[in-house]
Amino acid sequence: MKRISLLGPGTFTEESAHHFLGEQTFEYVNYKLIADVFQSTVNGSTDYSVIPIENTFEGSVSLHMDWLVHEVELPIQAEWVYPISINLLRLPHGDEEALDQAAVCRSIRKVLSHSVTMAQCQRFLRRLLPHVELEQVGSNGEAARLVRELNDPSVAALAPIGAGVLYGLETVAAGVQDHQNNYTRFVLIGRDKPELRPAPYVKTTILVTLPEDYPGALHQVLSAFAWRRINLSKIESRPTKKKLGNYFFYIDIEESMDTVLLPAALQEIEAIGCQVRIMGCYKAYSYPAM
């Protein structure tokens, strides 16, 4: 059975992987830190890693994208989009069952969560928990685990409801994210093509580094896709980390490398002196799973 590393347990990453890949199809290996998730697949301890790379409202997860680009040579093998519902969880505290949500929130002095999750709950935190200490941890599941370990009802976690079930926590408030239309994009990375069910469509991700001595090169790159009517679902500049002001472009393309048009477009781009790195050609799934 193939092994998949991810942040967990009790995380949105784990929840989404179980939803799209199945709980029995793969063996899942949990890690507390994203660096360990990546490295487990690099060193062969696992076959694949699941990485969150983009959120509807926070945009790209820059740290994870930089790992994909600069630290590892693992192609993207699949992607899926999963809804994120964030909950405020704490130890069960029977004495306060009669109190309303606002009163319970006033009794909380510290909230633990992942930095990206906290950023998605700023309105809720300002409105009901302006007094609390916010502490960032490696994952939302780790936040819930620490709440259970600390055994202190004044400490709470922002985490998935599944983390509350896993660690025996009660839900103080459900769906506290600032926006209800909140989705995260996850990618499966690894050296080999996995056996997965058919997907609605196939995408390709590339990195393009422009030649320094070619004015208008980015326009030329985009033109190579435009006249072929190839749709780009994302284009983002990221620093190459080699020279100030030197960037590459991370581009998601709604086309497969098995077509005639996309390889021809990449050849045209390379002909003007651009460096092109294919990050993956992969199945892409939407929510709910088809």
Image (cartoon, grey):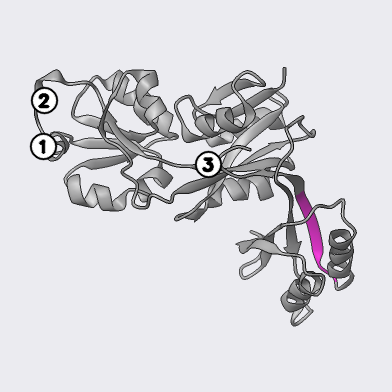
On the picture, is 109 further left or further right than 43? left
**Residue at mark 3 to residue at mark 2: CA–CA distance:** 34 Å
**Residue at mark 1 to residue at mark 3: CA–CA distance:** 32 Å
Image quadrant of residue 85?
A: top left
The residues colored magenta run: 273-279
**Residue at mark 2 to residue at mark 1: CA–CA distance:** 9 Å
On the picture, is 113 further left or further right than 22? left
- Asked if the residue at tag 2 contacts the one at tag 3, i.e. Cβ–Cβ closer than 8 Å, the answer is no
Mark 3 sits on what residue?
A: 82
Give the mark nearer the N terminus: 1 vs 3: 3
Q: Is residue 222 inside the magenta stretch?
A: no
Q: Position of residue 154 (x, y in %)?
A: 18, 29
Mark 2 sits on what residue?
A: 96
- Amino acid type at circle 2 is Glu
> Which type of secondary structure does the marked residue at label 1 adopt?
helix
Of 111 and 81, the residue lying toward us = 81
On the picture, is 274 further left or further right than 141? right
- Amino acid type at circle 1 is Ala
Image quadrant in which the N terminus is located: top right
Decide: few, some or many residues near mark 2? Use Cα within 10 Å; few <14, some 14-19, many ≥20. few
* Location of residue 264 with respect to 116 vertically, above or below: below
Q: Is residue 276 inside the magenta stretch?
A: yes
Image quadrant of residue 242?
A: bottom right
- Asked if the residue at tag 1 contacts the one at tag 2, i.e. Cβ–Cβ closer than 8 Å, the answer is yes
Of 83 and 246, the residue lying toward us = 83
Tell me which residue sits at (77%, 75%) in the image: 223
Q: Residue 103 bears which disc, if any?
A: 1
